[in-house]
Image: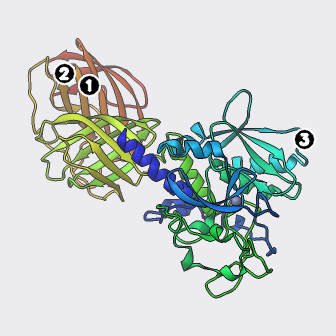
Amino acid sequence: MKLRTYWLKSWISILVLGVLFTFTNCEKENELFTEETSEETITTQEKDITEKAYPNKSGEVTEITYQGQQLTVEKIDGLYVFEGDILITPEELQNANKSTGRTKKLWPNCIVYYSIESSLPNKQRVYDAIAHWKSKTNLQFVKRTNQTAYINFRKIISGCSSQIGRTGGKQNINLANGCSTGNTIHEIGHAIGLWHEQSRKDRNTYVNINFANIQPGKEHNFKTYVQLGKDGDEYSPTLDFGSIMMYGPYAFSKNGKPTITKKNGSTYSVQRNALSIWDRIGVSRMYKKVCGTVPNMSGYYKANDGGHYYVRHIGTNVYWFGEHPSGSWANIFTGKLDGNKITGQFYDVPKGKIQGRGPLKLTVNYNSTKITKTAGSNFGGSIWTKTRRPSNLPGTRTAGFGVRNNINNLTARWYANDGGYYYIRQVGTHIVWFGERHFTSGRPPWSNVGTGVRIGNIIYLNWADVPKGNANNNGTLILRVDTANKMTRTYVTGGFSGSSWSR
Ligand SMILES: [Zn+2]
């Protein structure tokens, strides 16, 4: 639980930055998004399209602790206003000292409930903004029926504003007549958890803040999260001028001169048409985590125990086969994914010599490139890094342990009529295996893990190919133990070819 909390907290600090993390392993993402670059439209420069909750009002500037963070805000009409359009209610503030509060700020299962007040003019901007979010992210927007937590779009005299993240109750997105579809997209961004782009801690690398041009009392809107006492990571490699969450150069200007410029002094354009590519990547990652799914983990991982790990991820099930190239040990793992946590069991199998087993708890990072052990004292590895699968992988071996001629203990290397070696381990009634087609160089055409239970002489197994080989199937199997050294398949799903085993 500790670790989960820690993880959620780190996520939240990332989330709060709106645009997260530096890419270390970005090949795939780049491929995914390249074709959409042309969508990153930039509008012509406007004087100030910055959303403001209270365009013509100033309040007392004060410090509050919100979600464990010190924030400089303005108090206007009993509400705290941060960065111009982020409203924080006194009730929220009361709850904010709970360190886990922020974990409740995300929309479970990626479902955002909403209602639209009948008095809101031009509802089409809301429909269009929601349609945009639905088409560009993995979030779902569902009309509220009786849910307690929902966004309520309503009319306000002036300004556009929203609270940050899910409050747990009714939360308003306030839209004056001047708020466009793009402004509405921006405000929804706040409501699902995004803060402004210019609050990045490294923004001084990209922009100058011209305090002389800022309206008196609004300077706090130009602080970075670090200046506000916040920690976190940036998600995109550089400040994203294209983010729909980026302030324009004239935000809170008192004299018509820019308050934010590029480092060379020039102004820039911001847009309120669409989520930028980086907005989308950030939201997608953030909500994939919150919704309990991460990008598919399937692939090859190298671990700090020197092992090769071939991971298969199907729904919430995670399987792997791991082996040390020396042949000293080999194991299979089966686990369940919940959020970014994986809980399961490992069993050494007789492709190696060691005979360990035990529980393992792991966490996986947001893009499934790194797995970290959080519990499992009798397991050597603790960090797994996803990388390119080598072209030559450890070949088949003689059994490192096992027996023969014992119908009560199937632990051994078995040979099947599909050309595969199956390294089977029986512990009580529990049966696991790693199977791979015999090969002498390169990679096997297929490899799989099996895990199940033996009841009498019947074995019920789930099996899944792992990416040591190239096959990608999974299913169930029922085997019958015929004699001490012979088994026969009696049922199969999922395209499994072996049907008899011997040792
Ligand atoms: Zn805003």
Amino acid identity at mark 3? Ser
Disc 2 or 1, which lies upstream in sequence? 2
Tag 2 and tag 1, C-beta contact below 8 Å: yes
Q: Find numbered disc 1 in the image and state the secondary structure of the residue it sits on.
A: strand
Disc 1 or 3, which lies upstream in sequence? 3
Residue 288 on image: x %, y % = 53, 46
Residue that numbered label 1 is attached to: 500
Q: CA distance from mark 1 to mark 3?
A: 71 Å
Residue 410 on image: x %, y % = 16, 24
Amino acid identity at mark 1? Ser
Query: Residue drawn 30% across and 58% down?
Result: 390
Farthest front residue? Answer: 60
Tag 3 and tag 2, C-beta contact below 8 Å: no
Q: Quadrant of ligand 1?
A: bottom right
Number of numbered discs visible in the structure rendering: 3
Q: Find numbered disc 2 in the image and state the secondary structure of the residue it sits on.
A: strand
Badge 2 local density, few (<14 within 10 Å), some, or many (20+)?
A: some
Q: Quadrant of the N terminus?
A: top left
Q: Quadrant of the C terminus?
A: top left
Frontmost residue, 227 versus 479? 227
Amino acid identity at mark 2? Lys
Visible in this render: residue 10? yes
Left/right of residue 413 with respect to residue 281 in the rendered view: left
Eye-nearest disc, 1 or 3:
3
Q: Which mark is residue 427?
A: none
Badge 3 local density, few (<14 within 10 Å), some, or many (20+)?
A: few
Residue 415 on image: x %, y % = 20, 33
Q: CA distance from mark 3 to mark 2?
A: 76 Å
Residue that numbered label 2 is attached to: 486
Q: Is residue 5 above or below residue 460?
A: below
Residue that numbered label 3 is attached to: 119
Left/right of residue 126 with respect to residue 165 in the rendered view: right
